[in-house]
Amino acid sequence: PPRSRVLVVDNDADVLRGMQALLQGWHCEVLAARDADEALRLVAGATPDLVLLDFHLGDHQTGLMLRERLAAVMPPRPCVVITADHGIDVREAVAAAGCVLLHKPLKPLALKSVMARLLAR
C-alpha cells in the first residue's frame, strides 16, 4: 500500500504489537490503540487514511460501536473489521456498516490486498 496512516484498535496488547510491526514493515504510520478512548485521543491529533478494528474490544464494546464514535470526530474512512468470530450476526453487522471483514488468524497478504484496494479509492 502507499504510505498511509492507519489506526489499529485491538484490546489484546500482543495482537496490537504484531499489527503495528506488520504495518510499519509496509511503511505505514501506525496509530495503535487498545480501546475506544485511546483511539479517539489518537485521531484527534492525526486523521488516519484507514481504520483496522478488532470486533470484540471488551467491556461490551465492538469495533463497529467505536467506528460510530470515530465518525463523529473525523471524515469517513475505509474500515476493516478483524475478528475470530465466524458468526453470521457479526458478518451481517460488518457488511451493513460498509466495512470489510477479515478473520483471525489474520493472513498478512489478505490484509495487504484489502488495504491496497481500499486506499486506492
Image (spheres, rainbow, N blue to C red):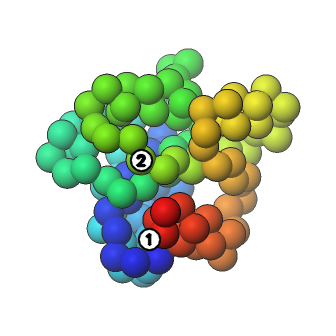
| Residue wearing tag 1 | 23
Q: Position of residue 116 (x, y in %)?
A: 53, 72
Above or below for 25 versus 81:
below
Near-viewer residue (5 or 31): 5
Look at label 2 and name its amino acid: Arg
Look at label 1 and name its amino acid: Leu
Which mark, by number, is residue 77?
A: 2
Which mark, by number, is residue 11?
A: none
Residue plotted at (44% across, 26% down): 68
Q: In which quarter of the image is residue 5?
A: bottom left
Q: Where is residue 108 in the image (x, y as percent from the top left)?
A: 63, 72
Between the C-alphas of marks 2 and 1, the distance is: 17 Å
Q: In which quarter of the image is residue 20?
A: bottom left
Q: Residue furthest left?
A: 45
Q: In this view, does 54 lie to the left or right of 20?
A: right
Near-viewer residue (96 or 121): 121
In front of the other: label 2 or label 1? 2
Residue plotted at (37% across, 31% down): 71
